[in-house]
Amino acid sequence: MSNELLLVVLATMMPISELRGAIPLGASLGIDLTVLIPLVFIINCLIFFPIYFGLNLFYEKIFSKWEITHRIFGRIRRKGSKYIEKYEILGLAVFVGIPLPVTGVWSGTVLAWMLGLDWKKSFISISLGVVLATTIVSLFTLGFLNGLGII
């Protein structure tokens, strides 16, 4: 794997940047968009599984003992539960799909886990959110790069 692709994969897996940082990064590194966008989409969707099931395995034994975990989870719950309460599982897709800080797959998965949502429905909803976020970020990135005359 090239160094550029490795950077994009790492950016996609990071809780702050996710695809919102990985797509512009990959495009700026000159990675072919027909490779970049599907790669980022797939990785961003698949990160759901280690987060959701990792929380099932480790929350009580490890994460629940850390004050920072309580603060982060509380912030996610405050920010995202209104979407779930109002729109249910579709709200989770919107929460993940709107490319704002603290609204990606990491937060959406934590939110689904905290609210006890079914993992299968949550994965489908989060994947739909990733489709929305990928589309928005890709269009923004392409428009920005086109405006600069890079593509």
Image (cartoon, rainbow, N blue to C red):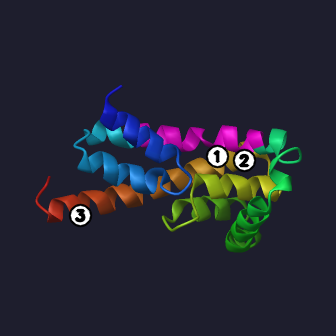
Percent of width and height locating residue 28: 25, 50
Is 42 a magenta residue? yes
Answer yes or no: is residue 38 visible: no
Percent of width and height locating residue 60: 89, 47
**Labelled disc at residue 124:** 1
Residue tagged 2: 121
The N terminus appears in which quarter of the rendering?
A: top left
Residue 61 as seen in the image, left or right of residue 126: right
Gap between marks 1 and 3 measured at Cα: 30 Å
Q: Say what secondary structure mark 1 lies in.
A: helix
Please tell me how many numbered marks the rendered image carries: 3
Q: Amino acid at mark 3?
A: Phe
Tell me the mark number nearer the camera, choosing from 3 and 2.
3
| Relative depth, front residue between 39 and 68 | 68
Q: Quadrant of residue 80?
A: bottom right
Question: Relative to residue 107, is residue 22 depicted above or below?
Answer: above
- Point out the stretch of residues depicted in magenta: 39-54
Q: Amino acid at mark 2?
A: Lys
Identify the residue at horizontal 45%, vertical 51% (top origin): 19
* Proximity of marks 2 and 1: CB atoms separated by less than 8 Å: yes
Q: Quadrant of residue 110?
A: bottom right
Q: Which sits earlier in the primary sequence, circle 3 or circle 2?
A: 2
Q: Say what secondary structure mark 2 lies in.
A: helix
Residue 70 as seen in the image, left or right of residue 18: right
**Labelled disc at residue 75:** none
Q: Quadrant of residue 85?
A: bottom right
Residue tagged 3: 144
Is 50 a magenta residue? yes
